[in-house]
Every structure is written in C-alpha cells, then in structure tokens.
Amino acid sequence: MSDLHFLGLGGTDEVGASSYLYLLKEGNLLIDAGVRPGQIGEAALPQLERLVEHPPACMVLTHAHLDHVGALPVVIRRFPGLSIYCTEATARIATLVLGDTLKVSTAQGYPLFSPGEMKRTLERLRPVPYFEWVKDHGFAFKLLPSGHLLGAASVLIRSGNRQVLHTGDVSNVATPVVDAAWLPHPNTVPEVDAVVSESTYGDTLLPSRKEQVRTFISAIGETLRGGGRVLIPSFALGRAQEITQILQTAMAGGLLPQVPIHLDGLTRGITEAYEEMLPLLPEALQNRTKVNKQRPFLAGTVNLVKDRREREGILASHRPAIVIASSGMLHAGASPQYAQAWLPHPENALFVVGYQDAESPGRRLLELQQGGEVMLPDSKGGLESVSAYSRVERFYLSAHADRGGLLGMIARYGPGKVILTHGEVRARANLAGYLNTKHEVSLPGAGELVPLQDSGRRRGSFMNTAPKKLEALKERHARATVRVTYDPGTHEIRLKLPADLDGSLFGEGEYTLEVLRGKLSRVKLREQDAEALAGMSATEDQATA
C-alpha cells in the first residue's frame, strides 16, 4: 500500500478549511473543500493550488458545514467537469450555505466566487444513498451515516485490495434532529488499513448530554423569569434546529415560560429547508410531528425574523425573549448585533452551545471576567468594543464525538495506521497519546504527504518485556502491597511500590496518573532515561492500567 497517500490541504491542525486528497492507485479522490470562518479572501482557503500537481478524478462532500463546503466553487473553477458526490440532504443544504457564503464574502469586498460559478458547482452535485458503492472512477467508495448533521457521511474508500475509512465530522450521540453515527456490528467490521479521523474534542470527555440539556433549560428559565433576554449564538445548520426542538419541548412541558423564540440570520432559511426535508429527519421527530399535527420547527412561539426593521424592534424591546442567531462563534451575521445590545445588561444572558475556535469572539467572550470587554464585528465591517455584564455560560451540546467516542470508533475498525485531522494542536496530541501504543499515528500539517500504511514500527507500551516473562512478573507481584497516599495541598496521588519490585516491569522515569470519571484508567510515563527511549519516535509512552 506504499503507493497510497494522504495529503491534507487544510483542516489538519485546525478546525476550518477542511480539504483532503487521497492519492490512490487508480486516481485521486478529493474530500471536501471548506473555508476558515472569520477569514476573508485567499486566507480563508485551503491549499487548493496543490490540486494542479495532483488533479482529482472525483470529489466527495461529507456534509454542508461552511468549513467543508465553502470553497467548492473555487475547485470547480479549476476542474469544471468534476463530479461531486454527497447525500441528498447535503446537496439540498449546500445550496443555502454557498448562497450565504457568496452574500457575506461579497459584502466584505472579497467574494470567493461568482453567482455563475456557484450555479455551475451546484450542477456538479451527484446525490447518492448511504451504503451504496460508487465504482465509476477506478477506485470505489461508499458513504456511511456519521451523525453530526443531517446528511453527514463518513467515507469508506477501496483501492485495490486495501481500504481506508475517512470519518468526516462524526458524532456517536443522537440528537432530536440527527441519529448517531452508524457503526458496523462487531462481527461485520470491514477490514481497514487506515482510519483518517477528526479530533475536534480529542482532549475532552464531554459531560452527559442529558444533564447538559437539563442545566441549559434551567439557566434559560432563570434568565427569563428574572425579566432578561437570552441570546444563543448558533451554527445555523443543525444546531439551531436542535436548540429550537429543545426549547419547544421545554415550553410544552412547562419547564420554560411561553416567550417568543426568534430565529435570525441564516438560521431562517436553513430551518425552512429542514421542514421540507422532514422524511430525512429521525423517525422519532417525524412521529412526534404526526401526533402533534404541527410543523416540526416553525410552530408555537417560534418566529422568523424577516428583515432589519423587525430585528431592530426585537433589540429595542425589553420583554423576555430568546434569540437563536448565526453565526455560532460571533464572527459575523446577526448574532454580534444582538450581543452588542444585550451583553452590557446584567439581567440578560448569552449561552454558548457549540465549538469556538481559538481566535473567535465567542472563545474570547468565554474567557472574560464579568464586566470585561470583547471586540465584536459591527454592521459596517469593523470591530466594536462591548462590555460584557450579562451572564455568559457554555453548554456542551456538541455534534462531535469526544475523546471516548473517537477511541471507541477507531478501536471498532482496528486499523494499523491512524491519521488525525480537524483538531487544534492540544486536541490532536492528546488523542494521539491514547492511540499510539496500538496504532501508528500521524499528525500531518497542511501540505504534508503521508503514506496510508503502517510502517511496521509501531510504538509498543513501556511494558515491552517478552510476554511469558511479563506474565511471570505479574504473577509474582500480584500479592505485593502498593501504598497509595493523597496530598490535598498539591492534589497529588502518590504510589509507593515495594522495594523488591522488578525494574523490568516498569522502566525508570516519572509517571503520572490520569483519572477519568472517578476511576483510575491510565498510567502515563512522561519522562524516561535515554536507554528506555532508544528506538522510540516520541517522548511519551502509555499503557492501560
């Protein structure tokens, strides 16, 4: 498989500008072409110029979020005959997302593409169903449901007798508007040589979603009953519809007062599109809609903000209300306008419900002390300093799998090689630490060519003694007494091992413990002597306790 390679054009050590090229025996497969939210012009694009030396035979679009779809017309400008495969839902939603991208980038003075290029791009979309092999280009691939978003897909790629799984953005938790990612039954797992996985929350164990929803509703209720207004900056696609469902259910159950729920920005058109795609939504939502005999989203107190005049009326009103507005990171759109008006007042609240990249206004707002100031985009394309006295809180309603979910998914497929993408430096490195005792792990930068092959030099755990000797050592030390003490001053757990413990079981060095949800789950050797490091490619080994 040495002639099969992976080339990340963007979205490798970042969450944005996702675009990945697979160099296969039969031809090249391009997956996604997104932009960096908050950037303009060429700075927003992946390294699409690399496609000149490696032209794609076809393309797959995993889902229609901006950071995966926003640069599609730029690709089609260079390769006008390229077929773009995706699910039906992704094809329909991509039309709205690209239209909004054109509108916003034109208003900023740096349009990425023209209306004609957008039209030609949409004509190249080829909707295909899940689980159906596409074999028209030499290599073969099929789309698998990945959770995350309506229509989102992982991609199983076959080249010769080798297979690679590209996870796309993936979630192993169901929400009101999308089912969890599909995983094969343990007895029918396809053999894959490599998994290319996202790592957005690779350093995080997310709290229980059910508990997060409960505390989220409680916080909104406290604000509304105190006479305040609630702003929920939200990704227009998927997250806004989920939040709408959560709020409608809470109001129907008496957990929230009946106040207006205003949808503003791109959330309006996307929500209307979701209503038209009801047959593609989870069965539970379809059944509830039939029983209640009402629209799934645009019912009850939900209101679509039609224009600037209506928005100004909402901003001027002091009556309790909830606004769900894009963008989710406060980069642009309607949400910064509400934030500028409502953040200075302590009775109001701004609740963050999605991922915030390192440079986003949303991330900086979360890091502020109450009363601090944050720079937000204004209506003229500049930035305005806003004092934040209102309640600001984060709730983890992510559409991405956390570290545990990603590890479980990768373990299900059992690849020799794992390539981690779509994550900040810390997230990727942390997840790699949990994987690299069983898999060969690569953390490529944008533009770096990586073989889709296990080199055979996988790192072993630091317990690298021969198996028979290791079993004998374990038996001999099974009855040994290990003293555990806890220092409340430094929050350190200290282990005192017996003096006669065989040193070949554990190498010399400094160890730390990682505790997950109250259980000792991992011993980590952080520093080793030079002899212990010989032959290893990194500075840290891990083993399950």
Image (spheres, grey):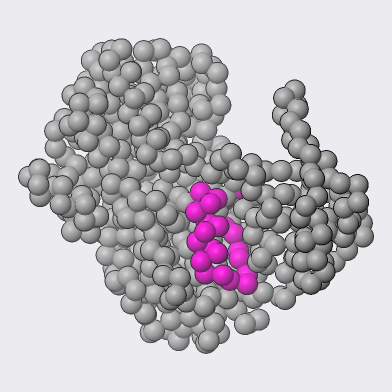
**In this picture, residue 47 sits left or right of residue 259:** right
Measured as percent of width and height from the top left, residue 186 is found at 45, 70
Residue situated furthest left in the rendering: 293
Residue for point 50% across, 61% down: 409
532 with respect to 98 (left or right): right
Residue 534 vertical placement versus 226 (above, below): below
Q: Is residue 415 magenta?
A: yes
**Image quadrant containing the N terminus:** bottom right
Q: Nearer the viewer, residue 187 or 438?
A: 187
Viewer-proximal residue among 218 and 307: 218
- Evaluate whether residue 198 shows in this view: no
Residue 394 is inside the magenta segment: no
Which residue is found at the position 45% from the left and 86% from the top?
138
The picture places residue 495, in percent across and down from the top left corner, at 79, 40
Q: Position of residue 131 (x, y in %)?
A: 34, 74
Instruction: Please name the residue shown 9% across and 47% down the image.
Output: 291
Tell which of 285 and 525 is nearer to you.
Answer: 525
Q: What range of the chain is rendered magenta?
A: 402-427
State whether residue 230 appears in this view. yes
Is 197 situated above or below 312? Answer: below
Closer-to-camera residue (484/355): 484
Q: Residue at x 71, y 56 (%)?
A: 543
